[in-house]
Image (cartoon, grey):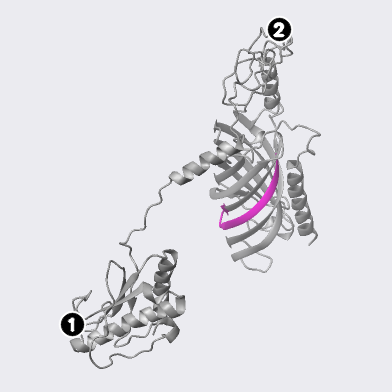
Amino acid sequence: MTVRKLTFAVLFALVSFALSAQEGAPTGTYRTFSPVDQWELGVDLGVPFIVGDVDSKFPGFGGGLHVRKSLDHIFSVRFGAGYLKAKNEQDAAKSDNTWISGGAQLVVALNNFRFNKPVRKILVNGFIGLGINNYKTKYENIQQSNAASTGELDGTTNAHIELGGNISFRINPRFNISLEHTVYSVFGKGADLLDSDENVDRGVTTYRDILHYPHVSLNFNLGGMDKNGMKKAEPLYWANPMSMVGDAIAALEARKIYDPTDTDGDGIIDEIDEEDNSPANARVDTKGVTLDSDADKVPDYKDKEPYSPPGYEVDADGVAKVPKYTTEAEVNRIVDAKIAAIKFPEPENDWFLPMVNFGDNRYDIRYSEYEQLYQVATVLKQNPSLKVVAIGNTDARGSEGYNNVLSYNRAKAAIDFLVTTHGIARDRLILNWAGEGSALVPVKGSSMANRRVEFRVAKGETEMARPEGPEAGKGNFKGNKDAGY
């Protein structure tokens, strides 16, 4: 338990160190010369072997992944995971180890103390770290403390220390290859059981079995733009710590030498003066050009009216030639004449007015038709001189005489509604009926489109009397004596 607590404490310290190292100094107190850099993602492939009580049977095989982030140009942290298999064999004794682990390392770029090149082509690293592993070992003909000589050891979960080094070759800004050797040493009781042969009172290996992992790592630099839209740099352990400082110095050296000469004495140095012969005492803008505040092509130092009203010609002194102002009476006269000359268009008679439809054998107004009648009433109210003809129609069912009376009742119901509900004068509405003779839909049966009242602008029509015959249809009228009934 003490070893595990110590392991987690060290891992926590490594992560805390990595996070704190990325925090810059407070804004305004120090300018960092380290750019925002990329992460490294690596794929590891290698041949692990175990140095223990039983000779290693080389090679094994293994692989893993890691991510690496720089803390500065020398130090970086790396987090990785791996899967390894190694075999040991000596005479009849055999063992087969399967290892799964994850860990964190502090990596030191050993040759990035030199500053003679912008980017390293070859980088030498050393590292040390802590991790967690779980291993199992199958064995044959190896005597165990429980008297078994063949079986499987489960190493459960253990802490370990890992250390090693590598040499990396930069292929391009996005990719590099590393040759690396990592050594794992397990803490606790499982330290001598990687090959399943425990060293107890025997003059062979030391107390611990050591797992070696020589491998090749294919490393990719990941990252696009930083928050300011700038392309991220390669990981800092590849870069010269003085490269940004050198660039800044080179930029300073490339700047022109400041020359304060002001030939025309207008307060703008010749380097940025676009008019280096401005008249003495003339006001100039920030580019040294003589001011012309009202843009009338007369410079202010000659202009007797430097803020002339725009849109007028000016004389040689810059004074605007403004015509005599128009009086209020003249403005009113002009406006009245313009209004009197406007000819408003006469309303057209060929207007489109909505129609009203009825239920089967009925002449009462349905709620769904109120909107159409409202529209007809609105047109009549907005055009007081307008008269409208209401023409009742039916479908082809029933006798012609019956349908004539029913169509009359429908036209009368629509007029009744307009007079009573919307206050339209009765003498502006002309009642006509057409029975079944003006079908919109040419069918003999029921058709709502044919059961209708049409509205048309009157063109000299006269009101038609009720056709002869008994009462037809069902419904009610809203008429009253005051409305003309």
Quadrant holding the N terminus: bottom right
Residue with the mark numbered 1: 444
Depth check, front residue: 354 or 467: 467
Marks 1 and 2, how far apart in space? 103 Å
Residue 400, placed above or below residue 116:
below
Whether residue 141 is visible: no
Residue 454, placed above or below residue 203:
below
Q: Earlier in the sequence, mark 1 or mark 2?
A: 2
Q: Report the span colored magenta.
A: 84-107
**Mark 2 residue crowding within 10 angstroms, few (<14) / some (14–19) / many (20+):** some
Residue with the mark numbered 2: 264
Whether residue 290 is visible: yes
**Mark 1 residue crowding within 10 angstroms, few (<14) / some (14–19) / many (20+):** few
Quadrant holding the C terminus: bottom left
Kindly indicate whether the residue at mark 2 contacts the one at mark 1 (C-beta within 8 angstroms): no
Choose mark 1 or mark 2, whichever is in front: 1
Is 160 displayed left or right of 482 in the figure? Answer: right
Q: Position of residue 31 (x, y in %)?
A: 76, 32
